[in-house]
Image (cartoon, grey):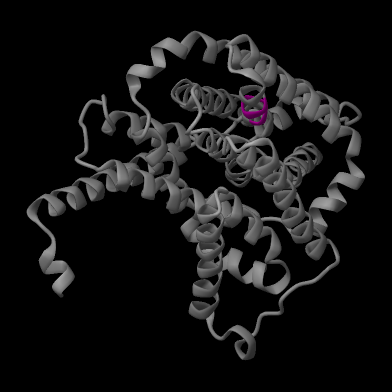
Amino acid sequence: MELAASLSRQDGLVLGELGSVLIALGIAAYIAAKIRLSVVPIFLFAGLAFGEGGLVTLELSDEFLDLGAQWGAILLLLLLGLEYSSKELFDSIKIRRSLGLVDLVFNFIPGALFALLLGWGLLGALTLGGITYVSSSGIASQFIKDSRLESKESTKRAVSVLVIEDLFLAPYLPVLSALLASLGFLSGLISISIALIITGIVLLIGARGFHIPHGPHILGDSATLLLTVFGSALLASGIATYFGFSGAVAAFLVGLLLTGDVAIVARIRLAPLRDLFSAIFFLFFGLSTNPSDIPEILLPAILLTIVGVLSKLATAWWAVRDLDEVGATWRAAALLIPRGEFSMVIAGLAATTVFAVELQALTLTYVILTTLISSLIIRTAKSKSS
Protein backbone atom coordinates (compact mmCIF):
# COMPACT_ATOMS: atom_id res chain seq x y z
CA MET A 1 0.00 0.00 0.00
CA GLU A 2 2.81 2.37 0.82
CA LEU A 3 4.46 1.70 -2.54
CA ALA A 4 1.21 2.32 -4.42
CA ALA A 5 0.64 5.55 -2.51
CA SER A 6 4.14 6.75 -3.36
CA LEU A 7 3.43 6.65 -7.10
CA SER A 8 2.95 10.08 -8.62
CA ARG A 9 0.36 11.14 -11.18
CA GLN A 10 3.15 11.05 -13.76
CA ASP A 11 3.78 7.40 -12.88
CA GLY A 12 0.09 6.75 -13.36
CA LEU A 13 0.20 8.30 -16.81
CA VAL A 14 3.19 6.13 -17.77
CA LEU A 15 1.37 2.99 -16.60
CA GLY A 16 -1.71 4.05 -18.51
CA GLU A 17 0.30 4.71 -21.65
CA LEU A 18 1.98 1.30 -21.46
CA GLY A 19 -1.35 -0.40 -20.83
CA SER A 20 -2.89 1.32 -23.84
CA VAL A 21 0.04 0.32 -26.05
CA LEU A 22 -0.19 -3.33 -24.92
CA ILE A 23 -3.96 -3.38 -25.60
CA ALA A 24 -3.34 -1.96 -29.07
CA LEU A 25 -0.67 -4.61 -29.65
CA GLY A 26 -3.10 -7.30 -28.57
CA ILE A 27 -5.66 -6.10 -31.10
CA ALA A 28 -2.99 -5.86 -33.80
CA ALA A 29 -1.76 -9.38 -32.98
CA TYR A 30 -5.31 -10.71 -33.35
CA ILE A 31 -5.66 -9.09 -36.77
CA ALA A 32 -2.22 -10.36 -37.81
CA ALA A 33 -3.18 -13.91 -36.85
CA LYS A 34 -6.33 -13.66 -38.95
CA ILE A 35 -4.44 -12.59 -42.06
CA ARG A 36 -1.51 -14.97 -41.34
CA LEU A 37 1.06 -12.21 -40.87
CA SER A 38 3.87 -12.35 -38.34
CA VAL A 39 3.31 -10.00 -35.42
CA VAL A 40 7.01 -9.12 -35.15
CA PRO A 41 6.92 -6.23 -37.68
CA ILE A 42 3.83 -4.87 -35.90
CA PHE A 43 5.58 -4.84 -32.53
CA LEU A 44 8.64 -3.18 -34.04
CA PHE A 45 6.57 -0.56 -35.87
CA ALA A 46 4.75 0.15 -32.60
CA GLY A 47 8.06 0.67 -30.84
CA LEU A 48 9.20 3.07 -33.54
CA ALA A 49 5.90 4.96 -33.41
CA PHE A 50 5.94 5.44 -29.63
CA GLY A 51 9.68 5.86 -29.06
CA GLU A 52 11.89 8.92 -29.31
CA GLY A 53 11.30 10.63 -32.64
CA GLY A 54 8.09 8.66 -33.24
CA LEU A 55 4.53 9.83 -33.79
CA VAL A 56 3.69 9.91 -30.07
CA THR A 57 6.52 9.76 -27.55
CA LEU A 58 5.88 7.83 -24.35
CA GLU A 59 7.22 9.43 -21.18
CA LEU A 60 9.65 6.63 -20.39
CA SER A 61 13.10 7.04 -18.85
CA ASP A 62 16.22 5.55 -20.41
CA GLU A 63 16.64 3.37 -17.32
CA PHE A 64 13.13 1.97 -17.72
CA LEU A 65 13.70 1.26 -21.41
CA ASP A 66 17.00 -0.49 -20.73
CA LEU A 67 15.51 -2.57 -17.91
CA GLY A 68 12.43 -3.46 -19.94
CA ALA A 69 14.52 -4.53 -22.93
CA GLN A 70 16.78 -6.61 -20.67
CA TRP A 71 13.85 -8.34 -18.97
CA GLY A 72 12.27 -9.11 -22.32
CA ALA A 73 15.53 -10.49 -23.73
CA ILE A 74 16.31 -12.56 -20.63
CA LEU A 75 12.90 -14.19 -20.42
CA LEU A 76 12.61 -14.72 -24.17
CA LEU A 77 16.03 -16.37 -24.44
CA LEU A 78 15.28 -18.53 -21.41
CA LEU A 79 12.26 -19.92 -23.25
CA LEU A 80 14.24 -20.34 -26.46
CA GLY A 81 16.88 -22.29 -24.58
CA LEU A 82 14.16 -24.55 -23.16
CA GLU A 83 12.99 -25.43 -26.67
CA TYR A 84 15.80 -27.95 -27.24
CA SER A 85 17.92 -30.20 -25.11
CA SER A 86 21.65 -30.43 -25.73
CA LYS A 87 21.15 -34.04 -26.83
CA GLU A 88 18.66 -32.94 -29.50
CA LEU A 89 21.09 -30.30 -30.70
CA PHE A 90 23.94 -32.77 -31.04
CA ASP A 91 21.71 -35.40 -32.69
CA SER A 92 20.62 -32.86 -35.31
CA ILE A 93 24.14 -31.79 -36.16
CA LYS A 94 25.25 -35.43 -36.50
CA ILE A 95 22.50 -36.10 -39.03
CA ARG A 96 22.78 -32.83 -40.98
CA ARG A 97 26.42 -31.78 -40.63
CA SER A 98 26.82 -30.78 -44.28
CA LEU A 99 23.57 -28.83 -44.26
CA GLY A 100 24.68 -26.87 -41.19
CA LEU A 101 27.99 -26.01 -42.87
CA VAL A 102 26.23 -24.87 -46.06
CA ASP A 103 23.85 -22.70 -44.01
CA LEU A 104 26.77 -21.11 -42.15
CA VAL A 105 28.77 -20.35 -45.31
CA PHE A 106 25.81 -19.08 -47.32
CA ASN A 107 24.49 -16.76 -44.61
CA PHE A 108 27.30 -15.75 -42.24
CA ILE A 109 29.87 -14.71 -44.83
CA PRO A 110 27.62 -12.22 -46.74
CA GLY A 111 26.82 -10.36 -43.51
CA ALA A 112 30.47 -10.29 -42.48
CA LEU A 113 31.53 -8.93 -45.89
CA PHE A 114 28.76 -6.34 -45.75
CA ALA A 115 30.03 -5.07 -42.38
CA LEU A 116 33.56 -4.75 -43.77
CA LEU A 117 32.21 -2.71 -46.71
CA LEU A 118 30.44 -0.43 -44.23
CA GLY A 119 33.75 0.11 -42.43
CA TRP A 120 32.80 -1.62 -39.18
CA GLY A 121 35.94 -3.73 -38.98
CA LEU A 122 36.39 -7.33 -37.91
CA LEU A 123 34.25 -6.95 -34.78
CA GLY A 124 31.42 -5.54 -36.88
CA ALA A 125 31.87 -8.38 -39.36
CA LEU A 126 31.58 -10.98 -36.59
CA THR A 127 28.47 -9.24 -35.28
CA LEU A 128 26.61 -8.65 -38.55
CA GLY A 129 27.55 -12.12 -39.76
CA GLY A 130 25.66 -13.60 -36.83
CA ILE A 131 22.68 -11.33 -37.46
CA THR A 132 22.36 -12.44 -41.08
CA TYR A 133 23.08 -16.09 -40.28
CA VAL A 134 20.54 -16.96 -37.61
CA SER A 135 16.88 -17.41 -38.53
CA SER A 136 14.02 -16.82 -36.11
CA SER A 137 12.92 -20.13 -34.61
CA GLY A 138 10.08 -18.31 -32.86
CA ILE A 139 8.61 -16.93 -36.09
CA ALA A 140 9.18 -20.25 -37.88
CA SER A 141 7.37 -22.22 -35.18
CA GLN A 142 4.45 -19.80 -35.40
CA PHE A 143 4.29 -20.26 -39.18
CA ILE A 144 4.40 -24.04 -38.80
CA LYS A 145 1.56 -24.02 -36.27
CA ASP A 146 -0.64 -21.55 -38.15
CA SER A 147 -0.20 -23.25 -41.55
CA ARG A 148 -0.24 -26.83 -40.17
CA LEU A 149 3.04 -27.80 -41.78
CA GLU A 150 4.22 -30.23 -39.09
CA SER A 151 3.87 -33.32 -41.27
CA LYS A 152 5.83 -31.98 -44.27
CA GLU A 153 9.32 -33.41 -44.76
CA SER A 154 10.50 -29.99 -45.99
CA THR A 155 9.40 -28.56 -42.64
CA LYS A 156 11.44 -31.17 -40.78
CA ARG A 157 14.49 -30.31 -42.87
CA ALA A 158 14.05 -26.59 -42.16
CA VAL A 159 13.63 -27.26 -38.43
CA SER A 160 16.90 -29.23 -38.42
CA VAL A 161 18.62 -26.11 -39.81
CA LEU A 162 17.10 -24.01 -37.01
CA VAL A 163 18.29 -26.50 -34.41
CA ILE A 164 21.85 -26.44 -35.76
CA GLU A 165 21.81 -22.64 -35.69
CA ASP A 166 20.79 -22.74 -32.03
CA LEU A 167 23.73 -25.03 -31.28
CA PHE A 168 26.08 -22.61 -33.06
CA LEU A 169 24.72 -19.74 -30.97
CA ALA A 170 25.54 -21.50 -27.70
CA PRO A 171 29.31 -20.79 -28.00
CA TYR A 172 28.95 -17.83 -30.40
CA LEU A 173 26.94 -15.56 -28.10
CA PRO A 174 29.25 -15.81 -25.03
CA VAL A 175 32.37 -15.34 -27.19
CA LEU A 176 30.86 -12.35 -29.01
CA SER A 177 29.79 -10.87 -25.69
CA ALA A 178 33.35 -11.14 -24.38
CA LEU A 179 34.84 -9.61 -27.55
CA LEU A 180 32.38 -6.71 -27.52
CA ALA A 181 33.29 -5.91 -23.91
CA SER A 182 36.43 -4.17 -25.30
CA LEU A 183 38.76 -5.84 -22.83
CA GLY A 184 42.53 -5.98 -23.10
CA PHE A 185 44.17 -8.92 -24.84
CA LEU A 186 44.88 -10.95 -21.70
CA SER A 187 41.54 -10.11 -20.04
CA GLY A 188 39.71 -10.80 -23.28
CA LEU A 189 41.46 -14.15 -23.70
CA ILE A 190 40.53 -15.14 -20.15
CA SER A 191 36.90 -14.02 -20.66
CA ILE A 192 36.54 -15.93 -23.92
CA SER A 193 38.09 -19.03 -22.36
CA ILE A 194 35.71 -18.85 -19.40
CA ALA A 195 32.76 -18.36 -21.77
CA LEU A 196 33.74 -21.40 -23.84
CA ILE A 197 34.35 -23.54 -20.75
CA ILE A 198 30.96 -22.67 -19.25
CA THR A 199 29.20 -23.28 -22.56
CA GLY A 200 31.02 -26.58 -23.02
CA ILE A 201 30.03 -27.74 -19.54
CA VAL A 202 26.39 -26.84 -20.14
CA LEU A 203 26.28 -28.68 -23.47
CA LEU A 204 28.20 -31.66 -22.11
CA ILE A 205 25.85 -32.06 -19.16
CA GLY A 206 22.86 -32.01 -21.48
CA ALA A 207 24.44 -34.30 -24.06
CA ARG A 208 25.25 -36.88 -21.37
CA GLY A 209 21.54 -37.25 -20.77
CA PHE A 210 21.51 -35.60 -17.32
CA HIS A 211 18.16 -34.19 -16.38
CA ILE A 212 16.30 -33.09 -13.29
CA PRO A 213 13.15 -35.16 -12.75
CA HIS A 214 10.04 -33.21 -11.95
CA GLY A 215 7.52 -34.23 -9.38
CA PRO A 216 5.63 -32.75 -6.45
CA HIS A 217 8.12 -34.38 -4.07
CA ILE A 218 11.10 -32.67 -5.77
CA LEU A 219 10.13 -29.20 -6.96
CA GLY A 220 6.63 -28.95 -5.55
CA ASP A 221 3.75 -27.58 -7.57
CA SER A 222 3.83 -25.59 -10.81
CA ALA A 223 4.24 -22.27 -9.01
CA THR A 224 7.38 -23.57 -7.28
CA LEU A 225 8.78 -24.83 -10.58
CA LEU A 226 8.14 -21.56 -12.43
CA LEU A 227 9.59 -19.44 -9.63
CA THR A 228 12.65 -21.69 -9.49
CA VAL A 229 13.20 -21.57 -13.26
CA PHE A 230 12.70 -17.82 -13.46
CA GLY A 231 14.84 -17.27 -10.40
CA SER A 232 17.66 -19.38 -11.84
CA ALA A 233 17.60 -17.41 -15.09
CA LEU A 234 17.60 -14.04 -13.32
CA LEU A 235 20.33 -15.13 -10.89
CA ALA A 236 22.55 -16.35 -13.74
CA SER A 237 21.83 -13.15 -15.69
CA GLY A 238 22.69 -10.99 -12.71
CA ILE A 239 25.97 -12.79 -12.07
CA ALA A 240 26.89 -12.69 -15.76
CA THR A 241 26.10 -8.98 -16.00
CA TYR A 242 28.16 -8.24 -12.87
CA PHE A 243 31.21 -9.89 -14.44
CA GLY A 244 30.75 -8.14 -17.79
CA PHE A 245 28.90 -10.83 -19.77
CA SER A 246 25.45 -10.70 -21.33
CA GLY A 247 22.60 -11.54 -18.97
CA ALA A 248 20.44 -12.67 -21.90
CA VAL A 249 23.11 -15.14 -23.02
CA ALA A 250 23.31 -16.53 -19.48
CA ALA A 251 19.53 -17.06 -19.49
CA PHE A 252 19.84 -18.92 -22.81
CA LEU A 253 22.44 -21.27 -21.31
CA VAL A 254 20.19 -21.86 -18.29
CA GLY A 255 17.42 -22.85 -20.69
CA LEU A 256 19.74 -25.29 -22.46
CA LEU A 257 20.85 -26.75 -19.13
CA LEU A 258 17.30 -27.41 -17.93
CA THR A 259 16.38 -30.61 -19.73
CA GLY A 260 14.14 -33.60 -19.22
CA ASP A 261 10.95 -33.40 -17.16
CA VAL A 262 11.67 -29.91 -15.85
CA ALA A 263 12.08 -28.50 -19.37
CA ILE A 264 8.92 -30.22 -20.60
CA VAL A 265 6.79 -28.93 -17.73
CA ALA A 266 8.35 -25.46 -17.93
CA ARG A 267 7.68 -25.27 -21.68
CA ILE A 268 4.03 -26.19 -21.17
CA ARG A 269 3.51 -23.81 -18.27
CA LEU A 270 5.40 -20.93 -19.87
CA ALA A 271 3.98 -21.31 -23.40
CA PRO A 272 1.23 -18.68 -22.85
CA LEU A 273 3.85 -16.23 -21.58
CA ARG A 274 6.21 -16.63 -24.52
CA ASP A 275 4.20 -14.34 -26.80
CA LEU A 276 4.04 -11.74 -24.01
CA PHE A 277 7.82 -11.82 -23.50
CA SER A 278 8.32 -11.67 -27.26
CA ALA A 279 6.03 -8.65 -27.54
CA ILE A 280 7.85 -6.86 -24.70
CA PHE A 281 11.25 -7.61 -26.23
CA PHE A 282 10.42 -6.41 -29.75
CA LEU A 283 8.42 -3.43 -28.47
CA PHE A 284 11.28 -2.18 -26.30
CA PHE A 285 13.80 -2.75 -29.08
CA GLY A 286 11.66 -0.53 -31.31
CA LEU A 287 11.26 2.05 -28.54
CA SER A 288 15.04 2.31 -28.20
CA THR A 289 15.49 2.95 -31.94
CA ASN A 290 15.04 6.46 -33.34
CA PRO A 291 13.12 6.39 -36.66
CA SER A 292 15.33 9.22 -37.93
CA ASP A 293 18.27 6.80 -37.98
CA ILE A 294 16.57 4.50 -40.49
CA PRO A 295 16.69 6.59 -43.72
CA GLU A 296 20.48 6.64 -43.59
CA ILE A 297 20.71 2.84 -43.56
CA LEU A 298 17.59 2.06 -45.62
CA LEU A 299 19.42 1.34 -48.88
CA PRO A 300 22.04 -0.91 -47.20
CA ALA A 301 19.20 -2.66 -45.34
CA ILE A 302 17.31 -3.33 -48.58
CA LEU A 303 20.45 -4.67 -50.26
CA LEU A 304 21.24 -6.82 -47.23
CA THR A 305 17.65 -8.13 -47.25
CA ILE A 306 17.90 -9.14 -50.91
CA VAL A 307 21.13 -11.00 -50.19
CA GLY A 308 19.66 -12.52 -47.02
CA VAL A 309 16.56 -13.80 -48.80
CA LEU A 310 18.59 -15.31 -51.63
CA SER A 311 21.09 -16.94 -49.26
CA LYS A 312 18.34 -18.59 -47.18
CA LEU A 313 16.59 -19.63 -50.40
CA ALA A 314 19.83 -21.34 -51.45
CA THR A 315 20.03 -23.06 -48.05
CA ALA A 316 16.43 -24.22 -48.39
CA TRP A 317 17.08 -25.61 -51.86
CA TRP A 318 20.13 -27.50 -50.62
CA ALA A 319 18.13 -28.94 -47.72
CA VAL A 320 15.25 -30.30 -49.85
CA ARG A 321 16.95 -30.87 -53.22
CA ASP A 322 16.33 -34.63 -53.05
CA LEU A 323 12.65 -34.38 -52.06
CA ASP A 324 9.76 -35.05 -54.41
CA GLU A 325 7.46 -32.56 -52.70
CA VAL A 326 5.61 -29.75 -54.48
CA GLY A 327 6.75 -26.32 -53.24
CA ALA A 328 9.30 -27.83 -50.86
CA THR A 329 12.00 -25.21 -51.51
CA TRP A 330 9.70 -22.24 -51.02
CA ARG A 331 8.08 -23.78 -47.95
CA ALA A 332 11.45 -24.40 -46.32
CA ALA A 333 12.68 -20.94 -47.39
CA ALA A 334 9.67 -19.26 -45.79
CA LEU A 335 10.65 -20.82 -42.45
CA LEU A 336 14.34 -19.87 -42.76
CA ILE A 337 14.15 -16.34 -44.22
CA PRO A 338 12.74 -14.43 -41.21
CA ARG A 339 15.30 -13.09 -38.77
CA GLY A 340 14.06 -12.05 -35.37
CA GLU A 341 14.84 -12.42 -31.68
CA PHE A 342 18.42 -13.71 -31.91
CA SER A 343 19.40 -11.14 -34.55
CA MET A 344 18.18 -8.39 -32.24
CA VAL A 345 19.89 -9.88 -29.21
CA ILE A 346 23.15 -9.87 -31.16
CA ALA A 347 22.60 -6.23 -32.12
CA GLY A 348 21.87 -5.44 -28.48
CA LEU A 349 25.19 -6.97 -27.41
CA ALA A 350 26.94 -4.40 -29.60
CA ALA A 351 25.28 -1.45 -27.86
CA THR A 352 28.62 0.00 -26.71
CA THR A 353 30.38 -0.07 -30.09
CA VAL A 354 30.95 2.94 -32.34
CA PHE A 355 28.61 1.48 -34.97
CA ALA A 356 25.84 0.61 -32.48
CA VAL A 357 23.28 3.18 -33.67
CA GLU A 358 23.61 2.21 -37.34
CA LEU A 359 23.64 -1.50 -36.48
CA GLN A 360 20.47 -1.27 -34.39
CA ALA A 361 18.57 0.62 -37.08
CA LEU A 362 19.90 -1.73 -39.78
CA THR A 363 18.94 -4.83 -37.79
CA LEU A 364 15.44 -3.57 -37.04
CA THR A 365 14.80 -2.77 -40.72
CA TYR A 366 16.33 -6.08 -41.79
CA VAL A 367 14.12 -8.06 -39.40
CA ILE A 368 10.98 -6.23 -40.55
CA LEU A 369 11.72 -6.76 -44.25
CA THR A 370 12.71 -10.43 -43.99
CA THR A 371 9.68 -11.20 -41.82
CA LEU A 372 7.25 -9.49 -44.19
CA ILE A 373 8.76 -11.32 -47.18
CA SER A 374 8.55 -14.70 -45.44
CA SER A 375 4.93 -14.00 -44.42
CA LEU A 376 4.09 -13.32 -48.06
CA ILE A 377 5.86 -16.50 -49.20
CA ILE A 378 4.12 -18.71 -46.62
CA ARG A 379 0.72 -17.30 -47.57
CA THR A 380 1.41 -17.85 -51.28
CA ALA A 381 2.65 -21.39 -50.70
CA LYS A 382 -0.39 -22.14 -48.53
CA SER A 383 -2.86 -20.86 -51.14
CA LYS A 384 -1.19 -22.90 -53.93
CA SER A 385 -1.24 -26.12 -51.90
CA SER A 386 -4.87 -25.72 -50.82
In the image, what residue occupies the spot 63% across and 31% down?
A: 382
As drawn, 205 above or below 42: below
Report x, y in % for residue 29.
Answer: 40, 42
In this picture, is 106 found above or below 336? above
Q: Is residue 107 visible?
A: yes
**Please, what is the dominant secondary structure of the magenta stretch?**
helix
Residue positioned 51% across, 28% down in the render: 353
Magenta range is 126-130
From the viewer's perspective, tell me whether residue 208 is left or right of residue 119.
right
Q: Between residues 63 and 54, which one lies in front from this camera angle?
A: 63
Q: Position of residue 298 (x, y in %)?
A: 46, 12
The vertical placement of 154 against 269, above or below, is: above
Looking at this view, name the residue that lies furthest to the left. 9
Q: Nearer the viewer, residue 2 or 209?
A: 2
Q: Is residue 89 above or below residue 346?
A: below
Q: In the rendering, at what x and y percent does residue 130 appear? A: 66, 31
Q: Quadrant of residue 370?
A: top right
At x 56%, y 62%, the residue is 236
- Decide whether residue 242 is among the magenta residues: no
Image quadrant holding the C terminus, namely top right
Q: Quadrant of residue 213?
A: bottom right
Percent x, y of residue 67: 37, 50
- Residue 326 shows up from this direction: no
Residue 208 as seen in the image, left or right of residue 36: right
Q: Is residue 310 left or right of residue 268?
A: right
Residue 381 quadrant: top right
**Residue at left 73%, top 70%?**
260
